[in-house]
Image (cartoon, rainbow, N blue to C red):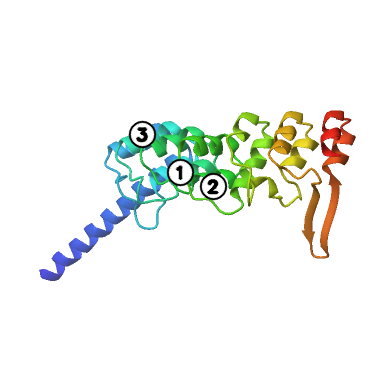
Amino acid sequence: MKKFGISVLICLSSLLSAQNKQQIDAFYTAIRENNFPLVKKIVDQGFPIKTTLPGETAPVLAAIWKKNFPMVEYLVNKGADITTEKKLVDGAIEYGSPEITFYLIKKGAYAKNALYTAIFHENFGIAKELYLNHQPQTLSYDDPGKLLLLAVKSNDLEFIKKLPLKGKDSPMDYFNYDGYNALLVAVEKNETEIAKYLLSQGADKKSRITFETDNGTVSGKTALQMAKANKNTELMKLLK
């Protein structure tokens, strides 16, 4: 009789495990398919969104991957954990969603690496907002230079003027993998006012495209040559 009882318990446990597995699969399938009504239904039936189940993706992160802000907001309001998983904000930035990014920051999600992530993914809009209004941030040595390049490429002189450019280790001295610094990008794009401002802050007017290869350093056009190609007489005078 005792063995029979144990067998029944094992069978019931197996049935419950199978049922839970079906519910978990249904929940994540609903998110992958962007089926918000079904996600709501499964959560209302008691799906445990307040913790991340072993071996599963955090529910909010799964919704971030679909760039579904209403779903993210719903899950957070239902109590989904946004503090244990440290990559929620990074995920929102990677998938290019400012709305989700700043919603999660407002709700208290971890965001110390957010500016680094935005710069890495070259999302200037998010990077700009983070730099201006969400400090302190953790940055690598080259990040100020990369941020300046993004600002130049976005033709945002107003923001560039907010960046500290003078002094040792200036962002203007940073060269990207293509061999460009901020001044070279500005001159090549024929952004006269940005180039003039950078020069006023001490940018090297002798700058030229420079990058490293297996065979050594390769040099390309100078800023002056670019200005000549653009027939920009104002910059040509400043770069001589």
Q: Residue furthest bottom?
A: 3
Percent x, y of residue 87? 45, 49
Q: Residue at x 59, y 49 (%)?
A: 143
Residue 13 versus residue 184 in the image, above or below: below
Q: Which residue is mark 1?
A: 89
Percent x, y of residue 65? 50, 42
- Mark 1 and mark 2 in contact (Cβ < 8 Å)? yes
Q: Residue furthest left?
A: 1
Q: Residue at x 38, y 36 (%)?
A: 106
| Front-lying residue, 69 or 237 | 237
| Front-lying residue, 24 or 95 | 95
Of tags 2 and 3, which is closer to the observer? 2
| Front-lying residue, 8 or 165 | 165
Res 117 label: 2
- Mark 3 and mark 2 in contact (Cβ < 8 Å)? no
SS for callout 1: helix
Percent x, y of residue 28? 42, 45
Question: What is the crowding at mark 3: few (fewer than 14 residues within 10 Å), some, or many (at least 20)?
Answer: some
Mark closer to the chain start, 2 or 1: 1
SS for callout 3: helix
Q: Residue at x 49, y 41 (%)?
A: 92
Residue type indicated by callout 2: Thr
